[in-house]
Amino acid sequence: MQRMGMVIGIKPEHIAEYKRLHAACWPEILAGLTAAHVHNYSIFLREPESLLFGYWEYHGTDFAADMQSISDQDVTRRWWALCSPCQVPLASRGAGEHWAGMELVFHLD
């Protein structure tokens, strides 16, 4: 299992919409994540800084293929079309990243 943390900004005027979307996340999105071996996925909001922190656990063996399977789904592209305008990617993110990956520095089971 691989633990993954990521961060992105959110436009303050879109916080309510982002919360509304995620309070009623589409079942097809959840099924796609599960099929891609993503578990224990959580998104946290930090205000007043307007940051989103995401955490998930990846239980698969081919991360690149599983993430591509999510990206390839039409329902995912429609979901992203709603969520992406709410987000503000960090200038310091890596090449090809939308959410900026984070280094795990401590974990307690």
Image: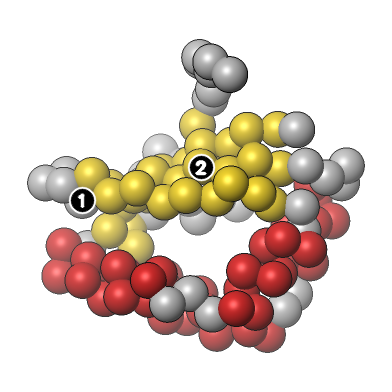
Residue at 51% over, 37% down: 5
At which x and y percent is residue 17?
26, 76
At which x and y percent is residue 66?
80, 57
How far apart marks 1 and 2 lie (CA) works out to: 17 Å
Check disc 2: other Cα within 10 Å, few if <14, some if 14-19, many if 20+.
some
Q: Is residue 109 visible?
A: yes
At which x and y percent is residue 109?
58, 19
| Quarter of the image where one finds residue 83 | bottom left
SS class of the residue under badge 1? loop
Looking at the picture, tell me which residue is in the foreground, 54 or 42.
42
Residue at 78% over, 63% down: 35
| Quarter of the image where one finds residue 94 | top right
Residue at 31% over, 75% down: 20
SS class of the residue under badge 2? strand
What amino acid is labelled 1 in the image?
Ser
Q: Counting residues from the N terminus, which is met first, the one under dot 1 or under dot 2?
A: 1
Is residue 40 shown above or below 73?
above
**Is 14 displayed left or right of 89 in the figure?**
left
Q: Nearer the viewer, mark 1 or mark 2?
A: 2
Q: Which mark is residue 55?
A: 2
What amino acid is labelled 2 in the image?
Tyr
**Is 49 displayed left or right of 41 in the figure?**
left
Looking at the picture, tell me which residue is in the foreground, 18 or 65.
18
**For mark 1, what is the residue?**
50
Q: Are marks 1 and 2 in contact (CB under 8 Å)?
A: no
At which x and y percent is residue 90?
36, 46
**Is 65 displayed left or right of 92 in the figure?**
right
Q: Is residue 95 visible?
A: no
